[in-house]
Amino acid sequence: MTAAEDLDMEGPTDAVHVWYMDLDELSSRPHRHLESALGPDERARRAAYPEARSRARFTAAHGVLRLLLGRFLDIPAAQVRMRCGPMGKPALLPGAPPVHFNLSHAGGHAVAAVSVGREVGVDLDRPREGFPLESFARRYFPPSESDLVLRAPREERMRVFLTLWTRKEALVKAAGSGIALGVGQPVGGTEDSVVVTAAQHRLRGTWRIRALSPPFGVGAVALAHSRPFRVIAHGWAANEGA
């Protein structure tokens, strides 16, 4: 499958491709093709992880992302050139095709998102045992959102909290900002698709956010502008790209 066939490389599209990855499954097999896809900056970042499992997960997630970008750009993965924005969001170099991408991971799972012509942010999170979500929501979320969390049945509160949290993360990542700005930004209720207009400097603009249905945890993806978009979901097989 060539994902670029579903996208118009000449202008904005109303689709985003997302790939779900089981990082531990990918790491359990020989992954020389993932290793060779990494660039020098990624190799340096990976070396900072003290644990072998963390380094292996990093190789899997970032290697897959580079292989995906290589498909969209029709070049070898190792030749994909990136730069980081002021808040660390990676992007292609100026003058490259308008391919936007983002990556998120939670433990042994990850999701990559790629779109054309619209900035994208994606987030994946998982339930956390013992996390004080009620007090966190009460302190940091807007009142309408903290009420959503606190009024939900106890067994549903973590899901509601993560639905709102992943939206905020996806939004700030699409904007190339940090979660400190986004935690207080209203992101609507719990419906599957919302339009958010943000006035804060580094979030300013209109964004459409959609819920994802990952095989693990809770996820959301945000694209610039209010137009609806399709989510085209894929899984990444352990031997794919080898």
Image (cartoon, rainbow, N blue to C red):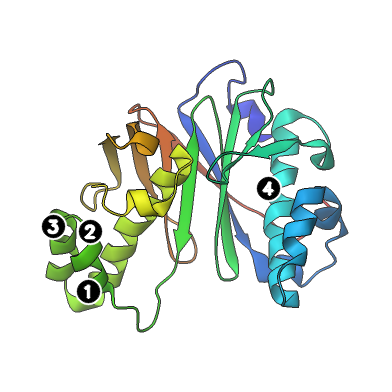
Q: Mark 3 near mark 4, Cβ–Cβ under 8 Å?
A: no
Return the x and y of residue 147 as percentages of the image width and height. 13, 62
Is 202 located above or below residue 213 in the figure?
above
The disc labelled 3 sits on which kind of residue?
Pro
Residue depth check, mark 2 versus mark 4: number of the one nearer the observer: 2
For marks 2 and 4, give the CA distance: 32 Å
Q: CA distance from mark 1 to mark 4?
A: 36 Å
The residue that label 4 is drawn on is 65
Q: Does 156 sit left or right of 211 as displayed?
A: left
- The three-letter code of the residue at mark 1 reads Ser
1 or 4: mark nearer the eye:
1
Q: Which residue is mark 3?
A: 143
Mark 4 secondary-structure assignment = helix
Residue occupied by mark 2? 141
Specify whether 66 is left or right of 193: right
Point 57% across, 46% down: residue: 88
Say which label, 2 or 4, has the lower sequence index.
4
- For the point 30% across and 47% down, the residue is 192
Please name the residue that numbered disc 1 is placed on: 135
Q: How far across and down, in percent of the image, does residue 71 sit? A: 73, 35
Q: Secondary structure at mark 1?
A: helix
In space, the residues marked 1 and 2 are separated at their CA atoms by 10 Å
Residue 39: give x, y in percent of width and height: 80, 47
Q: Nearer the viewer, residue 104 or 51?
A: 51
Q: In the displayed structure, does residue 38 sit left or right of residue 137?
A: right
